[in-house]
Image: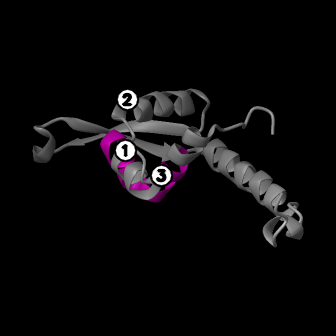
Amino acid sequence: MKGTYLGEFEELVLLTVGILHDDAYGLAITDELESRTKRNVTISSVHKALVRLENKGYLKSHVGGASKERGGRAKKLYLLTNSGKNALKESRSLRNHMWNDVPKIVWEGGNI
């Protein structure tokens, strides 16, 4: 897992980029994260995570076309790279293995 470690927020941002696929840009990612997590998310924290994830090679970006809705400004769009997809798969696999290894008694009334 060395080299593919994702913090919780980075993992959520990567997952959101995957969910939004062709329309993953800063504000859309922020809105989707807030909607799904019911947490306040700042656009600056999303942008910082996007830069980190792109530097790690988990995302790639390109500039989309300008739109009237944005006052003629173009969007910076993000896509998952193969490395990003692999990092998400490894993260999910580790979590699933750990969840599966929690003894049943913990869930069935192992109160302290």
Spatial separation of the CA atoms under disc 1 and disc 2 = 9 Å
Q: Quadrant of residue 92?
A: bottom right
Q: Is residue 21 left or right of residue 55?
A: left
**x, y percentage for residue 57?**
60, 33
Name the residue nearer the viewer: 111 or 74.
111
Between label 3 and label 1, give the one nearer the viewer. Answer: 1
Check disc 1 and give the amino acid type. Answer: Thr
Name the residue nearer the viewer: 56 or 49.
49
Upstream in the sequence, badge 3 or badge 1? 3
Q: Which residue is denoted by mark 2 in the rendering?
A: 44
Check disc 2 and give the amino acid type. Answer: Ser
102 is within the stretch colored magenta: no
Spatial separation of the CA atoms under disc 3 and disc 2 = 16 Å
**x, y percentage for residue 89?**
70, 54
Upstream in the sequence, badge 1 or badge 2? 1
Q: Is residue 44 left or right of residue 69?
A: right
Q: Which residue is denoted by mark 3 in the rendering?
A: 16
| Magenta span | 14-29
Mark carried by residue 4: none
Write the residue at 12% across / 37% down: 72
Write the residue at 10% across / 45% down: 68
Check disc 3 and give the amino acid type. Answer: Thr
Determine crowd level at label 3: few under 14, some 14-19, many 20+ residues with C-alpha closer than 10 A: many
Q: Quadrant of residue 7?
A: top right
**x, y percentage for residue 84?**
62, 44
Determine crowd level at label 1: few under 14, some 14-19, many 20+ residues with C-alpha closer than 10 A: many
Helix, strand or loop at mark 1: helix
Upstream in the sequence, badge 3 or badge 2? 3
Q: Which residue is denoted by mark 1 in the rendering?
A: 30
**x, y percentage for residue 25?**
35, 43
* Quarter of the figure that contains the C terminus: bottom right
